[in-house]
């Protein structure tokens, strides 16, 4: 018996939007602006849900983008953060982005991570997390965030990952609300009863 190879290919618009740019985004706000824009484009291009992410190096350059590709790929793993982490690790060629503490990468996500992405963050070697919309904003739009520790940001910080929340929260949350109001698919775990 042989099983399929698993491949992850970014939508063409995403590749084209970010490819070949060596732009540095000097502030967390500038990085979030870019990521929120990707979340809007993911809806506009109908390639997935209203979520995007990016991994940036210490100079604020985008190393890897991510957008929610769950429906398109038929795979529940491909939340925006997971896509960005997988892309970044593939790009640097190792599972520990931090390279044993010698390098520092930041994940910027348009919405606070769900239970799956929260778990993935501390296995990834990331040093810093920047969030836009709050998980409550995602819940208000109908998305389940899963079971996370109540003090999830404190748990990350205990493991050496700094967390900054509410960066352009309103803009990021507005994308979620618009998506829900327009009747976009809300894909939750099958046994979710919110
Ligand atoms: Zn997630």
Image (cartoon, rainbow, N blue to C red):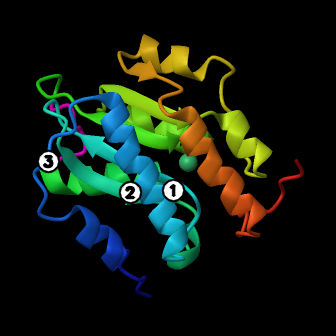
Q: Classify residue 109 as left or right of residue 11.
A: right
Q: Does the residue tagged 1 have its C-beta within 8 Å of any atom of ligand 1?
A: yes
- Contact between marks 2 and 1 (CB within 8 A): the answer is yes
- Please determine whether, in this image, residue 179 is positioned above or below residue 94: below
Please state the horizontal and vertical placement of residue 85, each as a whole percent of the image.
34, 49
Q: Which mark is residue 23?
A: 3
Q: Is mark 3 within 8 Å of ligand 1?
A: no
Of the pair 79 and 58, the residue shown nearer to us: 58
Residue at image point 24% right, 33% down = 105
Q: Quadrant of residue 43?
A: bottom right
Left or right for 118, reference 87: right
What residue range appears in magenta? 93-99
The percent position of residue 44, horizontal first and vertical second, equals 52, 72
Q: Secondary structure at mark 2?
A: strand
Disc 3 from disc 2: Cα separation: 17 Å
Residue count near mark 1 (Cα–Cα under 10 Å), binned few <14, some 14–19, many ≥20: many
Q: CA distance from mark 3 to mark 1?
A: 25 Å
Q: Which mark is residue 79?
A: 1
Q: Residue furthest right?
A: 193
State which mark lies toward you, 3 or 1. 3
The mark that comes first in sequence, 2 or 1, is: 2
Left or right side of 56 for 112: right
Query: Count of labels shown?
Result: 3
Report the residue at 73% width, 63% height from top.
186
| Mark found first going from the N terminus, 3 or 2 | 3
Residue 11 among those drawn in magenta = no
Rendering coords of residue 54 (x, y %): 34, 47
Q: Nearer the viewer, residue 4 or 181?
A: 181
């Amino acid at each position: 018996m042989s099983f399929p190879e698993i491949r992850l290919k970014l939508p063409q618009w995403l590749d084209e939007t970010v490819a070949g740019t060596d732009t540095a985004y000097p502030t967390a706000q500038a990085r979030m602006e870019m990521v929120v824009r990707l979340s809007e484009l993911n809806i506009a291009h109908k390639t997935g849900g209203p979520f995007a992410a990016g991994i940036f190096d210490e100079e604020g350059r985008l190393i890897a983008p991510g957008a929610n590709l769950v429906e398109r790929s038929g795979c529940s793993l491909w939340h925006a953060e997971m896509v960005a982490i997988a892309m970044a690790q593939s790009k640097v060629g190792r599972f520990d982005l931090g390279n044993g503490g010698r390098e520092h990468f930041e994940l910027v996500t348009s919405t606070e991570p769900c239970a799956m992405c929260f778990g993935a963050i501390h296995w990834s070697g990331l040093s810093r997390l920047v969030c836009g919309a709050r998980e409550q904003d995602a819940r208000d739009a109908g998305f389940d965030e899963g079971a996370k520790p109540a003090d999830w940001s404190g748990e990350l910080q205990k493991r050496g990952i700094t967390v900054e929340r509410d960066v352009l929260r309103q803009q990021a949350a507005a994308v979620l609300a618009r998506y829900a109001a327009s009747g976009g698919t809300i894909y939750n775990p099958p046994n979710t009863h919110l």
